[in-house]
Image (cartoon, grey):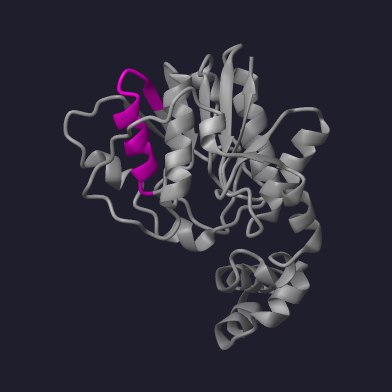
Amino acid sequence: MNKKAKAVLSINIAGLIYGVRWGLRNAANKLALCYDFIDPLGKGKEISSAETLKKLSQISQTDIENIVKEIPIVRLDARQTYVDGALPQKDLMGLLSLLIDWGPDVVVEIGTFHGATTAAMALNVPNAMIHTVDLPLDYQIGHEREANIPKDDFHLILGRKVGEAYKSLSGVNNITQHLFDSAIWDFEEVKGASFFFIDGSHTYEYAKNDTEKCMSVAHSKARFVLHDCDERHPGVVDYVFELIKEGIPVTRIKNTAIVFFDKN
């Protein structure tokens, strides 16, 4: 849906007042942003896309036990409860299985959010350093400066409590928090990392940016895991399908929104 259409669907009194005071172009931008809050996943356009579903059906799938050497016993903080935007249990178990199986020294996570996944990774690979990246705490939606590529999940950005879950863990000292937009962050800080979990903004542009930058600094042997490869996130599906067309053997873990590929 284009910006003009979004603006029309989002017209309200506040928006009209804004337009009178600041001009029609700025008003249209603000109203389009309001529409994204109302429909943050773009369901009106894409959730039922036959093309997205077709691409998903063509991604190779397998059960986790066919990937890892053995199914691990994982450690979790029993105080953590599920919040909107966190990994569902099935996806978390798939991620942790891939992580423990790989046994990395350095892990990079794009998209900290509340930090429950960060905490789980830190507990299950205690000898690895976890670098986790999320937007600055003072980030304001609609006030982009250097990173001018489209984001989504604005409702989650507004409700973030960055790192809250892992900060409550006692004795855990293998997490480094980076507060930057991944579109402008210097990934050289994590050069040589061998496990990457990419779960930031889910537009095509961010999925591509984050994955390609991770690949550019990765160890010669590395594992890349992307979340939200499902019908609700067509941008991620489009990018994953592009990787497959380039000959990268991406696999989806059955009954999850997790896909991964290895660099050997």
Residue furthest bottom as drawn: 13
Highlighted range, magenta: 114-130
Q: What's the residue at 47%, 56% (across, down)?
A: 157
Whether 96 is drawn above or below 17: the answer is above
Along the line of sight, the residue nearer the viewer: 254 or 124? 254
State which quadrant residue 214 falls in. Answer: top right
Q: Quadrant of the C terminus?
A: top right
Q: Position of residue 36 (x, y in %)?
A: 61, 68
Whether 230 is drawn above or below 97: the answer is below
Along the line of sight, the residue nearer the viewer: 106 or 189? 106
State which quadrant residue 1 falls in. Answer: bottom right
Q: Position of residue 94 (x, y in %)?
A: 48, 39
Q: What's the residue at 56%, 39% (across, down)?
A: 63
Q: Is residue 148 visible?
A: yes
Q: What's the residue at 59%, 56% (across, down)?
A: 152
Q: In the figure, is residue 151 to the left or right of 175? A: right
Q: What's the residue at 64%, 43% (across, down)?
A: 206
Q: In the figure, is residue 253 to the left or right of 238? A: left
Residue furthest top as drawn: 220
In magenta stretch: residue 125 = yes
Q: Position of residue 223 (x, y in %)?
A: 57, 24
In magenta stretch: residue 47 = no
Whether 110 is drawn above or below 149: the answer is above
Q: Position of residue 191 (x, y in %)?
A: 53, 16
Residue furthest left as drawn: 170
Q: In the figure, is residue 238 to the left or right of 179? A: right
Q: Is residue 179 visible?
A: no
